[in-house]
Image (cartoon, rainbow, N blue to C red):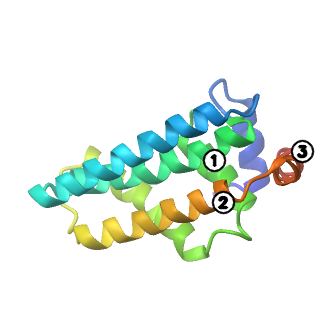
Amino acid sequence: MKPAKTYLKWCLAQKKGIRVVTESENLQNAYLKKSGEALRSMQINAKEGIGEWVIATGYYTKYFAIYALLSRLGIKCEIHDCTIALFGPLFANVIPKQLMDDLKQAKDDRIEAQYYTTEIPTNSQEVIAKTTDFVLKIEEIIDGLNSQKIVDIQKNIKTLLG
């Protein structure tokens, strides 16, 4: 795997990679809504015993929450790996390592469940609990944002992408 800074530079060079845009509370709210809808979908799939979609919607619930946060900060990126690569170091001091590990595992499990025929054993209640914890942490970060914190984080983004 490439060093983080090298990978982020690659992400910046991609057409749909990391872009600094105007921050948007409207986009933040739209992606939080998508995250909530994915969470409800995950719960329905769990109730119906559809493990593959519990895994997929669990990942998307987390991803949409991250995208909401980044939208609020003025970041756009359509490459999932790049979004996650930026999110990790940007919030390493705020997000517990276990939640970051869960996010990366959720992405790997989603790919495995959706693109391969291997059945992944799924403890739906555990996936729901981990996903809910992750989203609550992201929402806590969003709720704690103010103008100064946004400026400080944007400076960190410029340093990371520097």
- Look at the image and tell me in which quarter the C terminus lies: top right
Disc 3 element: loop
Q: CA distance from mark 1 to mark 3?
A: 21 Å
Task: Give whichever of 116, 32 is nearer the camera.
Answer: 32
Please identify, in this view, whether the residue under mark 2 or under mark 3 is nearer the observer: 2
Residue identified by numbered label 1: 69
Q: Does any portion of residue 79 appear in the rendered image?
A: yes
Residue drawn where x is 55% and y is 39% of the image: 29
Mark 2 in CB contact with mark 1 (< 8 angstroms): yes
The disc, 2 or 3, on the residue closer to the chain's N-terminal end is: 2
Q: Quadrant of residue 144?
A: bottom right
Q: CA distance from mark 2 to mark 3?
A: 24 Å
* Place of residue 42 in the rendered image (x, y in percent of width and height, measured from the top left): 27, 53
Residue drawn where x is 54% and y is 76% of the image: 98
Disc 1 element: helix
Q: Please say if 102 is above or below 15.
A: below
* Place of residue 124 in the rendered image (x, y in percent of width and height, measured from the top left): 23, 67
Q: Quadrant of residue 158?
A: top right
Instruction: Classify residue 10 as left or right of residue 150.
Output: left
Residue identified by numbered label 2: 141
Q: Decide: few, some or many residues near mark 3? Use Cα within 10 Å; few <14, some 14-19, many ≥20.
A: few
Question: In the image as oriented, which residue stretches furthest toward the top?
Answer: 15
Instruction: Classify residue 106 as left or right of residue 7.
Output: left
Residue identified by numbered label 3: 162
